[in-house]
Amino acid sequence: NFMLTQPHSVSESPGKTVTISCTRSSGSIASNYVQWYQQRPGSSPTTVIYENNQRPSGVPDRFSGSIDSSSTSASLTISGLKTEDEAAYYCQSYDFNNPWVFGGGTKLTVL
Amino acid sequence: EVQLVQSGAEVKKPGESLKISCKGSGYSFTTYWIGWVRQMPGKGLEWMGIIYPGDSDTRYSPSFQGQVTISADKSISTAHLQWSSLKASDTAMYYCARRFSTGRYFDYWGQGTLVTVSS
């Protein structure tokens, strides 16, 4: 089994850029796609990035995803931060033996 | 419009049984997997299991195998999550979510069902 580790929290000011990491404990991060979900307080999760770097329709291009094949990490970058971006963000991936694995989540504070 | 509408909040006592539901609409219910995800109070997301309503093929997370039962009634486009004997530690928000057709991620989520188990 593998785990996905995220920082517990990050904070940044409006208008700035923040990057949230997601580190895979074993196996290559490039072996399977990584997704990112946003969960605002009191709401259901929504997808902001799928298949490493794809944005669903309706998600602004301020959101971008990437993976670092040389390491074991994926990243979610949010530029031009807005107060509405304040939420928890979860990465998610999988492998043959672990169909769905979520990271522990990162609480983003925009202040 | 794709929608997953879940049943309402439940308050139960330890040892009681429970079945919650997730009704899909706006798409072909039988051709998309439906997953269940637990979120305990103040905690993260945990995958519980997933079902293909077309033939009821079901997969469980090892953490939840034997603890819950996932089923689907395609005649009413509804998936279910059930417990035979609830514990206080089952207190959580439970989400159903649709798996994207060709990918290993969830593209639509229900609004969640809060289950509270307390004596």
Image (spheres, coloured by chain):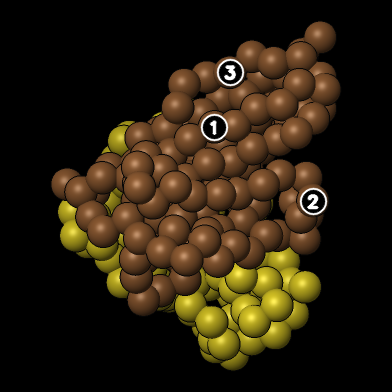
Chain colours: A yellow, B brown
Chain at numbered mark 2: B
> Crowding near pointer 2: few (<14 within 10 Å), some, many (20+)?
few
Q: In terms of depth relative to the viewer, which is nearer, B32 or A63? A: B32
Can the viewer see residue A104? Answer: yes
Measure how far apart labels 2 and 3 are at the Cα level: 21 Å
Whether labels 2 and 1 belong to a single chain: the reply is yes
Q: Which residue is mark 2?
A: B66
Q: In terms of depth relative to the viewer, which is nearer, A19 or A25? A: A25
For badge 2, the amino acid type reads Gly
Of callouts 2 and 3, the N-terminal one: 3
On screen, residue A97 versus residue A92, left or right, reads right
Q: Secondary structure at mark 1?
A: strand
Whether labels 2 and 3 belong to a single chain: the reply is yes
Q: Is residue A46 above or below residue B13?
A: below
For badge 3, the amino acid type reads Glu
- x, y percent for residue B21: 48, 35
Q: Which mark is residue B10?
A: 3
Q: Is residue A111 above or below residue B33?
A: above
Of callouts 2 and 1, the N-terminal one: 1
Chain at numbered mark 3: B
For badge 1, the amino acid type reads Ile
> Crowding near pointer 1: few (<14 within 10 Å), some, many (20+)?
many
Q: In terms of depth relative to the viewer, which is nearer, A22 or B59? A: B59
Q: Secondary structure at mark 3?
A: strand
Q: Which residue is mark 1?
A: B20
Find out whether the residues at labels 2 and 3 contact each other: C-beta distance under 8 Å. no
On screen, residue B59 versus residue A61, left or right, reads right
The image quarter containing residue B78 is: top left
